[in-house]
Image: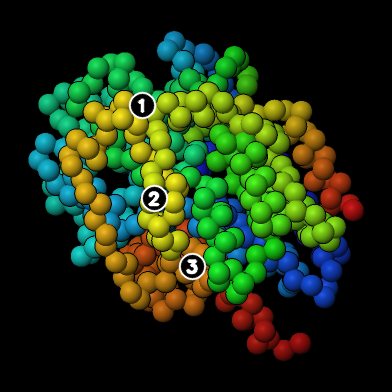
Amino acid sequence: MKHIDEYRDGGLARAIAATITREAVARRHYHFMEFCGGHTHAISRYGIEDLLPANVRMVHGPGCPVCVLPVGRIDDAIALAMRPDVTLCTYADLMRVPASAGRSLLRAKAAGADIRMIYSTLDAIHIAETEPHREVVFFAIGFETTTPPTALAIKLARQKHLTNFSVFCNHVLTPPAIRAVLDAPDNAAIRIDGVIGPAHVSTITGTAPYQSLAADFAKPIVVAGFEPLDVMQAILMLVRQINEARHDVENQYARLVTARGNMIAQLAMAEMFERRASFAWRGLGELPHSALRLRAAYADLDAERRFAITPTATADNPACECGDVLRGLTRPVDCKLFGTSCSPESPMGSCMVSPEGACAAHWTYGRFRDRARAHAGRLPA
Amino acid sequence: MCLAIPIRVEALLPDAMARVTLGGVSKCVSIALLEDVQVGDYLLIHVGYALARLDPDEAAQTLAMMRESAQA
């Protein structure tokens, strides 16, 4: 596949790794957080950590919308879906996320709720058009990448005068989450030296929103693509910035990301959405101005208003350490549930559900390398 | 969640839609978020919408930079 395969060249990756090893100063540590789950997945899948020298360590960040959605919002969605008049449309990512009392959207569907997996918001609009007797609710989640498609669906629903379509909005914003991670008092414990910035979020936002983050925390940020060579190149760029005592925003993903981003998408988002005063993130807690809701002008298409949803606060499973995993404080293998009662087949926590979650990525790929390393250690020299 | 890949535009369709093909699978996607899309452009497709157009010159520069990093 053109524009993909070129960035998966293993020989080139090893050669860049050799440069990283040469340039990383042996007596110092380089701890980089990859914010996005897409990067976490690539790092696990392609074994990037195995190529890096011991003093360059990757810390997994909270950039997985499925992982940071609080359980209470899934409970709210299930309650909506259980209404006999409602058809709940959702991306497949959310189907297996554990809600409270052992429930999930998948189990609610099995129990008879009308829940439909869709590929695009246009599918939800199509269902609303063709089934006018159903109240079609789109369960919207995602960062800035996924928000413009929701905005366009709202616009389309208004143009088509659809009265049976609404959006249960859970869109969240990336910069407040990066700020929260860098600002946390326990950041001292993990000491993040630099950040690999979002790939596809940045196609929408541009690199401009990261400038104040890099300046405020004196940390370099390199926006990078999700392919393995993109990640390797970004790590090298971060090592060089640290060595040169710089904390700039650099753009490794210039083939798709610009400084300003996608202005049409930004305008569509600004027209339909406004910032909530505050929103709860799993792992990060309440973050001010970190999420979106529909503007008053589109209140009639807002499922929260139409169905008078009052936010349910639900505590996470106390044994599940997703919260600390999302902040980079705990590694998946350090959680008691990892690989025992929690696996992708029967997940206890959200980080095990999404393929981009740190736990699922480690379960699917990383643990085999751990085993290979342990095995290699036992072999006679 | 933010999974998206660059795919070539095969044909422009009415209502700000375009047909793209990847690995033999053809799909119609929205190009309402982009301006002046042409057949042959590589667009970043996410949940049925094109979010960005790939800049081939920048792609060539990035690959050159990677090869340079490999020899540094």
Which residue is denoted by mark 2 in the rendering? A278
Q: Alpha-carbon distance for marks 1 and 2? A: 24 Å
Residue furthest toward the left? A84
Q: Please tell me how many numbered marks the rendered image carries.
A: 3
Which residue is denoted by mark 1 in the rendering? A153
Residue furthest toward the top? B14
Does A280 sit left or right of A232 as displayed?
Answer: left
Secondary structure found at label 2:
strand
Q: Position of residue A113 (x, y in %)?
A: 15, 45
Packing grade of label 3 (10 A; few <14, some 14-19, many >=20) is many
Q: Alpha-carbon distance for marks 2 and 3? A: 22 Å
- Residue type at mark 3: give it: Val
Q: Chain of mark 2?
A: A
Image quarter of residue A44:
bottom right
Of mark 1 and mark 3, the one earlier in the sequence is: 1
Which residue is denoted by mark 3 in the rendering? A325
Residue at 17%, 39% in the rendered image? A307
